[in-house]
Amino acid sequence: MRSVAGTRLDRRPIRGGAPVSINSRLSGLRDLDATARRAAVTEAAGLDAGALDALDPARGLTLEAADHLIENVVGIIGIPVGVATNFTIDGVDRLVPMATEEPSVVAAASNAARMTRGHGGFRTSTTGPVMIAQIQVVDAADPEAARLRLLEAREELLALADAQDPMLTSLGGGARDLVVRTLPTRTGVHLVAHLHVDVRDAMGANAVNTMAEALAPRVAELADGRSLLRILSNKADQRLIRARAVFDAELLGGAQVVRDIVHASAFAEADPYRAATHNKGIMNGITAVVLATGNDTRAVESGAHSHAARGGGYTALSHFELGEGGHLAGTLELPLAVGLVGGATRAHPVAQAAIRLLGIRTAAELAAVIASVGLAQNLAALRALAAEGIQRGHMTLHARTIAASAGAAGEEITRVAERIVADKLIRLEHAQDVLAELRSVR
């Protein structure tokens, strides 16, 4: 295996399978083949040899294991898993697994992260792992009075909720608050109780749903109504993660590029048509890490987009502005319900390998990584748009996919991709013509 420059070989001992200190600045990684890359990343992360073997499709999720994850299993779909480099998050270097089929995402996130290293990398903060369960009550004769009766029984209801999950409470989690709303609807005024639950290192769906089911009869009794829906909300606005970073002006391409990125950010903040694509760029990074770690991509995406519309109109999740010294300051805030316990995160071997590679210990650390990748990916897209147009870098990488789709193999992929990029005809039919021409002269 070829060596990778930037790998720190004098790390301190590893505790609990996670590296105490690594260097995510791995140059030369793209020049290796996939097997050598995996070995290099394993070494750089300070993991035991074979710790990431589950990333080999021959040793990952089996059909038998898949049959226990969902119903009516007929097969397994493969998604490429890449590793984003250069990330420093809250003072710790991280190698970040990303599962995505879209070209340029991993490279773009890695490049954007490189631009923050001289300014301390990414910094994050969180409101804590609090999820919300909703209990809907209909047919209450006096909704406002019922709301007050429920609030008067707050301590009783919180205790009943905690009794459903002694393990969670023993770990320092459990029910934290009860909020009750009256909600006018087209079928009358509904009463909606929100149970706030600290779910610790879990995503929390099972815990809060169980509590909501247990509380529903007593809530209905107190409200003198009928309980109907009782389920978590994916609008997890009590579980916010915030990330910020300073991106170096010179590495971005100079002062004009910085100013243009700020203009592009303002466009996304003001216009929902632009905001939809702007936020999609953020989710390119976020969803890739969520998927790689076995978390719920749909829950995270719905939470993010609901947060973008929290003011009544759809807007950008991130903001970029001119910072000190002419550098670019970027910020991102969104709900992020992810966990390390339960579900596919524990049952899927690739997800387990991804968690080992990250070297994280808590769900809060995982959320910090995911938000940082989202901000990095967003910046990379904005820079491409402001500086050179999105097609140049993206389509260069996309050309390899087109070449493979045309039937190219091995070194043919590189040669066909280079040719169709040079011809500025990155289309399947042209790739097929180029491949036929290459093969005809052999």
Image (cartoon, helix red, strand yellow):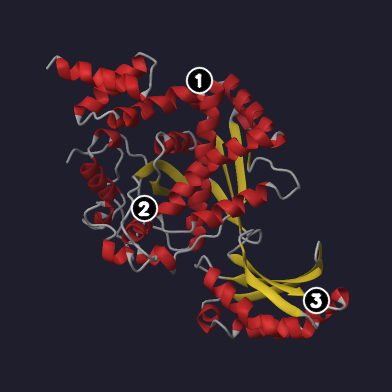
Among the two numbered marks 1 and 2 on one chain, the one whose residue lies closer to the N terminus: 2
| Residue type highlighted by circle 3 | Asp
Residue 306: x and y in percent read: 65, 51
> What residue is at 75 percent from the left and 75 percent from the top?
137
Q: Quadrant of the C terminus?
A: top left
> What residue is at 30 percent from the left and 22 percent from the top?
431
The image shows residue 230, relative to residue 82, as above or below, that is below
The image shows residue 16, relative to residue 175, as above or below, that is above
Q: Find numbered disc 3 in the image and state the secondary structure of the residue it sits on.
A: loop
The image quarter in which residue 172 lies: bottom right
Q: Which residue is mark 3?
A: 139
Q: Which mark is residue 388?
A: 1
| Circle 3 Cα neighbour tier, 10 Å, few/some/many (<14 / 14–19 / ≥20) | some
Residue 121: x and y in percent read: 50, 42
Q: Quadrant of the N terminus?
A: top left
| Residue type highlighted by circle 2 | Ser
